[in-house]
Amino acid sequence: MSNVLSEAKRQQVIALGRLGWPLRRIEQETGVRRETASAYLKAAGVGVRPPGAWGRRAPAKPANEVTTGFGVESKAENPKRSVCEPFREAIELGLSRGRDATAIWQDLVAESGFGGGYQTVKRFVRKLRGKQPPQPRAVIRTAPGEESQVDYGTGAMVRDPQTRKYRRTRLFVMVLGCSRKAVRFLTFRSSSRIWSELHEKAFRRLGGATRVVVLDNLREGVLVPDIYDPTLNPLYRDVLAHYGAVALPCRIKDPDRKGKVESGVGHAQRALKGKRFESLEQAQAYLDRWEASCADTRIHGTTKRQVAAMFVEEKPALLPLPLEPFRYYQHGKRGVNLDGCIEVAAAYYGLPPGWIGREVNVQWDELYVRILDPKNGLLLREHVRQKRGWYRIKREDRPQHMPLQVSQLLWRAGRAGSHISTLCHLIYSQLGEAGIRRILGVLSLAKKFGTAAVEDACAAALEMGVHEYRFVRRYLERAPQLTLRQVDPLIRELVHYRDLINLRTQEPEDEPH
C-alpha cells in the first residue's frame, strides 16, 4: 500500500466503502487518497465501484456475499428467501419508529454487519408495509379563530447584503386551522426575539390573533420539550400572552398534529423553487403577490372552498389586537452580590433582604428592570433603569443592622491602616450597601500600590474632605512611584569626586626630561 493509515482512519474508510460511497467521495470526506482507500477496501474484501458506474454495473473485484451500493444485489441472496429475513425484527422496529428504507439499511450495515444491498432492504420493507393495512389519519377540525399552526421551512436563495453572495433564507409560515389562510415571511436568521416578532407581524397582518398556537419543539419557542409540561421560552410566552394566545407544543416527532402548516410550508416551497432574488424585500414582495393571487384564491382540497372566502368568515372570530405592540425585553439569570444587588448593564439594583448569594431571573428593557423569583416567577422588585455605575435600592430593602460580611470587610480595612479604616467607615455610612464595592476597591488598591501608599492617599482624601474611592485611585495613579532621597549611603558626596578629578589632572612637580 502506498500509505499506512491509522487504525481509526482505516476503519472509517472501510465503513464508508461498505456504505457504497465512491472513492472520490471517500477522499473528500476523509482526506485519504483514492489509491490508498482502494487498496484498503480490496484488502478488506469490499468492492470498489468504478467512476460513473453508480447503479449500472457491479463493482470491480466484489467481495464474496457482500453488496456495497444502491441498486446492486448480493450474490449470495436466495431468490426464495431474502437475506433480510434474519434481520426482520430490526427492520420492523425501525419501521415502527418511522424510519425509511434508506435509514434502516444504513443502520443494518453499520450496526449488524448486514451484507445485502439497499434495493434488497427496500423490497423487503415494501413487502412488510404491504401486509400492514393503511393507518387512518384523523382530520383535525377547529372552530373559527380557535387555532393557528406555525413552523419554519427553507426559503428562497437571496443575495446577502453584507457578503454579496446568495444565501438560503428561512421561511416562516402561520396557517389558520379553520380557513387555511396562511401568512408567510422570509428571514435570514432566527432567534427568540425574531421568532416572536414574526408571530406579532403575522397577527397584525391577519387582523387578529388565535387563542391557541400549535408549534414544533424548536429552541426559539420551547426550551425543554415535554409531553405534559414543556418549558416555554419566557419571551415567546409573554408575547403570546400579550395577544391573548397560548402555545401548544406538539409531541416530539409528531408532524401530523400540525399537518396544515406542514402543507403550507411545502406549498410555498414549490412556488419558490429554483428562484433567486437580489434582496430580501424583493423576495418578500414576490411571496406576497403569490399569496394573494394563487394561495388565497385556490380551492382547498379538504374544505372544497376558496381560502379567501373562508377567511372572510373566520376573521371576525379572531381575538382583537391590543392597542400597543409588545414591549420586548432581554432576560437572563443574575447572582445577588454581597451588597444585596444584581448587576445589569453595569448598573446595580437592590433586592429584599435574604437573597445574597442566590440566583434570580431578570428581565430588562429600555425603561425598567424586573427581578423575578426563579421558583414561582413572582415579581420581587421592579426598578427604573439607571446609568452605568449607579445604584437603585428601595428604602425598605436597606438592612437595619450592619451585616456580618460588612463588619468583616471593615475589620480588614482597620488592619490595613488607620486612615484606610476611617475612609472606609465614612464611605459605608454615606452610601450604605452601595458603598461596599467602593470599600472593596480601596482594599484592592493595596495589592497594586502597597499598603503604605494607599494609607497616604486615604490621608490626603480625609484632609481634603473627599470620601471617594475614585479620588484615592486617581491619586495613586498620578503620584510618582519612585522618589530619590537627598542622602543615601550608596551615593558619595561631591567633594570626593572633586578631589579625585584634581588629583588626576594635576601635573607632577619633578617630571624627568
Image (spheres, grey):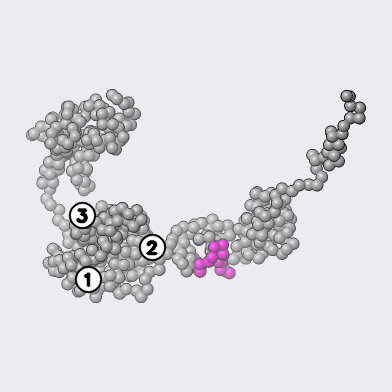
Residue 215 in view, yes or no: no
Query: Does dot 3 land on a helix, a strand or a loop?
Result: loop
> Circle 2 is placed at which residue position?
235
Q: In the image, residue 202 lies at what x, y percent?
A: 29, 67
Q: Residues within 10 Å of mark 3 (few under 14, many from 20)?
A: few
N-term mark: 2 or 3: 2
The residues colored magenta run: 378-395
Which image quarter is the C terminus in?
top right
The mark closer to the camera, 3 or 1, is 3
From this viewpoint, is residue 507 visible? Answer: yes
Residue type, label 3: Gly
Q: CA distance from mark 2 to mark 3?
A: 36 Å
Q: From the viewer's perspective, is the residue at label 2 or at label 3 nearer? A: 3
Residue at x 89% of width, y 30% of height: 508
Instruction: Name the residue that disc number 3 marks.
Output: 274
Mark 1 or mark 2, earlier in chain: 1
Residue 329: percent from the left, percent from the top? 42, 64
Q: CA distance from mark 3 to mark 1?
A: 35 Å
Magenta-colored stretch includes residue 386:
yes
Q: Is residue 204 above or below residue 408?
A: below
